[in-house]
Image (tube, rainbow, N blue to C red):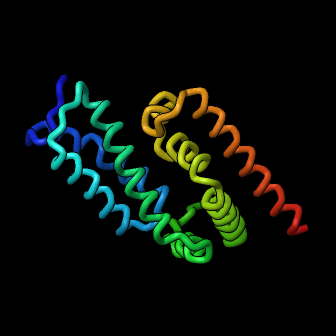
Amino acid sequence: MNIKSTDRDDFALVYEENYALIMQVVMNIVYDLDVAEDLTQEAFERFYVRNMSFPSDNEAKYWLIRVAKNLALNYARRNKREGEMIEKVKKMPRYAMKGLDGQEETIRAEEEDALRKAIIELPDNLRLPLQLKEFSGLDYKAIGRILGISEVNVKVRIHRARKKLEEALGREERDVY
């Protein structure tokens, strides 16, 4: 199936099938819903304006993910200061956790905050593969194509990211007691 980016039907198909995934990828980098929506729209705009052909809808999806990821990274690099990023994470909405009492909810919220902070502090080359795997549900092969690295390298980076998270979260627990 050949996909032409300027064909209305092809564009609509790619947009409908991939919008949520692209939003998720961008959101996991910028942690700001308004910015994520803008960058996602910009990625789709570039897709349309480029007047490109893709041999399959998967190729179009991978191209869009790469463009959206790069747009999000560029945005994050322009606006990245550690203090601001931590404040953004603190301002993220909390969803009601049914069935938990106040203490359990507080503990869970603190654990989520610690995890988000630890993820934010990972270097881009480790954070991105981990986010694409864990939060976007992509397989190693797809992540490799998006990032332009081998599948083995993806696995290594995800393993290293998980180890760094374990170290960071383990260190915090020891500091508390």
| Left or right: 78, with 52 as reference point | right
Image coordinates for residue 38, horizontal then vertical, percent: 30, 64
Residue at point 38%, 56% (across, down)? 71
Residue 177, placed above or below residue 159: below
Image coordinates for residue 139, horizontal then vertical, percent: 49, 31
Q: Nearer the viewer, residue 113 or 71?
A: 71
Q: Specify whether residue 68 is in view.
A: yes
Which residue lies most toward the top here? 1
- Find residue 151 and report its image quarter: top right
Quadrant (top left/top right/bottom left/bottom right) for the N terminus: top left
Image coordinates for residue 54, horizontal then vertical, percent: 22, 30
Residue 40, placed above or below residue 149: below
- Find residue 115 and report its image quarter: bottom right
Q: Specify whether residue 24 is in view.
A: no
Residue 2, placed above or below residue 138: above
Image coordinates for residue 92, horizontal then vertical, percent: 51, 70
Which residue lies most toward the left here? 8
Q: Nearer the viewer, residue 46 or 27?
A: 46
Count of marks overlaid on the render: 0
Residue at point 58%, 47% (across, down)? 125
Quadrant (top left/top right/bottom left/bottom right) for the C terminus: bottom right
| Left or right: 89, with 18 as reference point | right
Q: Nearer the viewer, residue 28 or 160?
A: 160
| Left or right: 16, with 66 as reference point | left
